[in-house]
Structure formats: C-alpha cells, structure tokens
Amino acid sequence: MATYIDPFLSLGHSTTLKEKYDEIKFVLEKVSYKQHQWIICVDLKMVGFLLGLQGGYTIFSCVYGTAGQEQSTESKKHWPVHSELIPGSFDVLAPPLVKRSKIVFPPLHINLGIVKQFVKTLEKDGDCFKYICMKFSSLTIEKLKAGNFDGPQIRQLMNDADFCNFMNSAELSAWTAFTNVVKFFLGKTKAPNYKELVETLLTSLHQLGANMSIKLLFLHSHLARFPENLGDVSDEQGERFHQDISDM
C-alpha cells in the first residue's frame, strides 16, 4: 500500500507548513524518507514539488518528457524523455527529493481530470449539463462549469442509472469509455484490453472537443509507467484531508 505524505502535517510544530519545496524537504527529513524509501501516491501538484519542478506556467509540465501545457488532443504521442531531472533544464528548479520510480500516478486525480475535461465540453444549455447542475445543486455554477468534482461526487454520477438518459450519443460514448477505464484500468482490475479501453476514451474525448491536459497526457503517452494494480494505491486519503480542511 502506498504511503501518502502530506506537507500540511505540522509534525509537532505550532506553525502550519506550506506547500513549498523547502517545507516538503523538511517533512521528508523528519519522517526519515531516505531510510524508508516508501512509494508515494499524491496529486500532481505535489509530484511537481517532490521532483523540484516549477509550480506554474511551465513550458515543460510533464515529469517524464518534454510535453508542455494543455494542448489539443491531436498532440503527438511520443515526446523526448527526461533522462535526468537537472536543475536549470526543462523547468527543473531544484534537485528532486524522491526518485521518479517511487512516485505512483494518482488514480483519483486522473479521474478528476478526465471528468473535468468531459464537463468542459458539454453544452451549458444541454440536458446533460442541466442534469449535473440539478444533481449537485449545492455547488456554485462556476465549479459546475469548470467540472470541479471530488471522488464521491464522481461515484454518484457513475452509479446514477438516469444520468446516461440525458446524454447525446457523443457524450454517452465518452462517459461509457470513462467508466470502463475507471473499472478496468484505474482500479484493482487491469483488463487485458486496457490499452484499447484507454484509446477509446481518448478518441471519444477528442470527438467532444476536449483538450489534452497533463492528466490525459499520462494516459496518452505514458501507459507503460502505470503500476500493474492501481487499486493497491490511493491518493483519496490526502484528497479527503484537503476537503476536510476546506470545510473547516
């Protein structure tokens, strides 16, 4: 099971730690990470901190290759690989705090990214988006339009038999492809045809007009770097922690 290391834990200090490179380095030293070398599953912003990458407005936002910011889904599939993360090159600001091989792609945050791209493509006066607004009436219209949902809300949609009745054919194809990827790749079950399922999802999102976000890029260009069983790891504990802090 992957260990989630959250930089907001104060470790006995009276001052809350911030999500900064030096603060995270301090946390890793305090938990003796070099000695234990745990596998880490965290959101992609934290991955950037752990690997010493620039935080925002990056030219090279991928931790494995030279792919950049959000692009069309027609982007090329193969990118030159970062053999090493060297400060001063490809938006690397500081030496990595952990090995890339110790970081597992966060399945929950990839799900969140896919749903965000799906919702962004919906006609805002269409039946599908109106149904989402009705189902999550407590959310602001800004959050709904941006597709900012959490894990439990996504599961509500996936378990809602009526949701598909409000989709057109293109939306239904994309949503069906998404649920198949969640069930048969981003969970405990890795189907023999997982590559075909992922390709179907990317194709259907492209037909809806979705962009290639960094989370979709991992599915598009780095399938080989996913572990055999993503159900063995989870970033949801950290996501729940952030949700609780937000509510407080």
Image: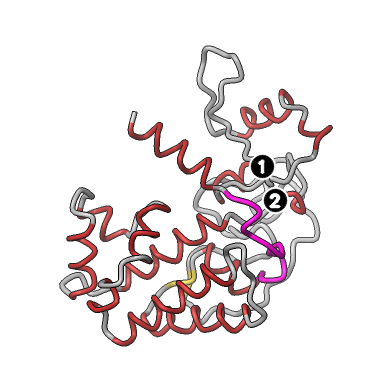
Question: Over which residues does the magenta segment extend?
Answer: 222-234
Residue at 36 percent across and 81 percent down: it is 208
Q: Quadrant of residue 173?
A: bottom left
Is 52 situated left or right of 70 in this image? right
Q: Which residue is mark 2?
A: 103
**Disc 2 from disc 1: Cα separation:** 9 Å
* Helix, strand or loop status at disc 2: loop
Is 122 situated left or right of 186 in this image? left
* Count of numbered circles in the view: 2
Is 102 situated left or right of 199 in this image? right
Q: Position of residue 63 (x, y in %)?
A: 66, 57
- Is 231 included in the stretch rendered in magenta? yes
- Is 214 included in the stretch rendered in magenta? no
Q: Determine the residue located farthest toward the top in the rendered image.
A: 14
Residue at 67 percent across and 54 percent down: it is 104
- Say above or below: 193 vs 43: below
Q: Position of residue 28 (x, y in %)?
A: 71, 30
Indicate the colouring scheme: secondary structure
- Say above or below: 144 vs 219: above
Which of these two is toward me, 27 or 150?
150
Residue at 57 percent across and 59 percent down: it is 59
- Say above or below: 137 vs 66: above
Q: What amino acid is labelled 1 in the image?
A: Leu
Q: Are marks 2 and 1 in contact (CB under 8 Å)?
A: yes
Q: Which residue is mark 1?
A: 50
Which of these two is toward me, 243 or 77?
243
Q: Position of residue 146 (x, y in %)?
A: 31, 59
Q: Earlier in the sequence, mark 2 or mark 1?
A: 1
